[in-house]
Image (cartoon, helix red, strand yellow):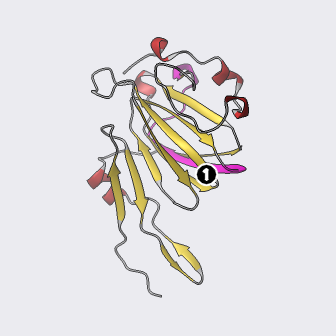
Amino acid sequence: MRFQTTLIMEFIKTEIEGVFIIQPKVFEDARGYFFEAWKKAEFDEHVGKVEFIQDNESKSSFGVLRGLHYQRGEFSQAKLVRVISGRVLDVAVDLRRQSPTFGRYVMTELSAENKRQFFIPRGFAHGFLVLSDEAIFTYKVDNVYAPQAEASIRWDDEQIGIKWPIETSQVLLSEKDRHARPFSEAEYF
């Protein structure tokens, strides 16, 4: 099988302005598969110019919920996230005061099988829940981690109302996430 020189990625707009699901075209044959995970020219054309400066990776087990995290002020971050092993439910919450979707969230399942990516611009809280036995989660960011600017919103905040698909008793949180603030006390953009 010969691979085409121009590969296609589908950039799917969500109901929240600026948040995209990116579905790569995957080429499979008896040997396995190939796809372009990120291509600057296509990303810039469909999403806009974002200068990613760092890649991060985490490994988590079933029920681990990381989030809802964001960085304030000049340290806010845009993220391009994906899963390379396992399955997660990924969530972005709009914290932009002037946005018509302020306080709303959008979610998508990311998995090694569907190879989707999720772009979350600056001005959002972000989190994910591991749905498989374990998951390896990787993401690009456009700004450095700044502990002094870090903030979290409660994963189960009633005002946001995220519908997580597992029982509360199965959710595993860090100490930081157990003590996150409610949405009403968040610092907005």
Is 140 part of what is drawn in magenta? yes
Q: How far across and down, in percent of the image, does residue 135 sit? A: 66, 50
Residue positioned 60% across, 82% down in the render: 31
Q: Give 169 or 45, whichever is nearer the viewer.
A: 169
Q: Amino acid at mark 1?
A: Arg
Crowding at dot 1, Cα within 10 Å, few <14 / some 14-19 / many 20+, comes out as many
Q: Which residue is mark 1?
A: 87
Q: Is residue 8 above or below residue 55?
A: below
Q: Is residue 154 above or below residue 28?
A: above
Q: Quadrant of the C terminus?
A: top left
Q: Is residue 7 above or below residue 59?
A: below
Q: Which residues are magenta?
A: 132-151
Q: Give 117 or 105, whichever is nearer the viewer.
A: 105
Q: Is residue 170 left or right of residue 139?
A: right
Q: How far across and down, in percent of the image, does residue 68 sit? A: 54, 29
Residue positioned 48% across, 11% down in the render: 185
Q: Secondary structure at mark 1?
A: strand
Residue positioned 57% across, 35% down in the render: 164
Q: Quadrant of residue 95?
A: top left
Is 33 part of what is drawn in magenta? no
Q: How far across and down, in percent of the image, does residue 3 sit? A: 43, 81
Q: How far across and down, in percent of the image, does residue 81 sit? A: 50, 47
Residue positioned 59% across, 18% down in the render: 180
In the image, farthest residue toward the bottom = 1
Total count of labels: 1
Q: Is residue 46 left or right of residue 84?
A: left
Q: Quadrant of residue 128?
A: top right
